[in-house]
Amino acid sequence: MKTYNKAIFMPKDKLACVLGKTFALEFSTHAIEETEKDKFGRFQTYKKLTITEKNVIELSLDDTLNVCKLLVRLAYNAFSEVCYVIVPQNDKAFVKTCWLCRKNDRHATLDKSLYETK
């Protein structure tokens, strides 16, 4: 699997494959549990998600170079944003996990060695 982070490099052609798509979200048991015990408190989930260039943080490709996983970051409230790790499946997306992060969190400790550079 190849994984890209928008802070390093994002393949525009692969991103274009999912841009504008709206997915009905289905949550794993783990993701539901995370909404109840997040370090910033309990949070509600979205039922649908539309992919935009702004909200995609990470994109992963499978062995056939198709998008197989996305990390998206969405506005949640005045202080927080919600992150979802999703697996797109036609018009649905399976949410593997999710968490809240503060709006001002910019991940200064990002390990660039974990991501593709081109």
Image (tube, grey):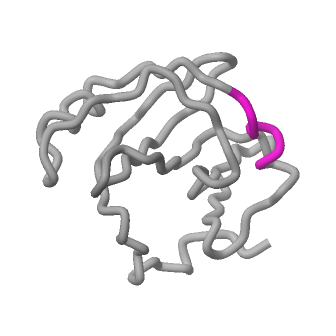
Check the image and report above or below for 40 versus 5. Answer: above
Q: Is residue 42 left or right of residue 44?
A: left
Q: How many marks?
A: 0
- Across and down, in percent, residue 34 comes to 21, 38
> Is 58 located above or below residue 93 in the figure?
below
Q: Main secondary structure of the magenta part?
A: loop
Q: Quadrant of the C terminus?
A: bottom right
Residue in the picture at 58% in, 50% down: 55
**Looking at the image, which residue sits at the far right?**
13
Nearer to us in this view, 52 or 70: 52
Work out whether 83 lies above or below 34.
below
Residue 14 vs residue 94: left or right?
right
- Residue 84 location, quadrant: top left
Seen from this angle, which residue lies furthest front?
78
Q: Position of residue 72 (x, y in %)?
A: 52, 47
Q: Which residues are magenta?
A: 15-21
Rendered location of residue 60, percent (x, y): 64, 50
Residue at (63, 59) in percent of width and height: 3
Residue found at the very far bottom of the displayed protein: 108
Q: Position of residue 77 (x, y in %)?
A: 32, 46
Q: Quadrant of residue 97?
A: top left
Residue 79 part of the magenta segment: no
Q: Which residue is found at the position 41% from the left and 83% from the top?
A: 108
* Of the pair 24 and 94, the residue shown nearer to us: 24
Judging depth in this view, the residue of 96 and 40 nearest the camera is: 40
Residue at 55% over, 33% down: 87
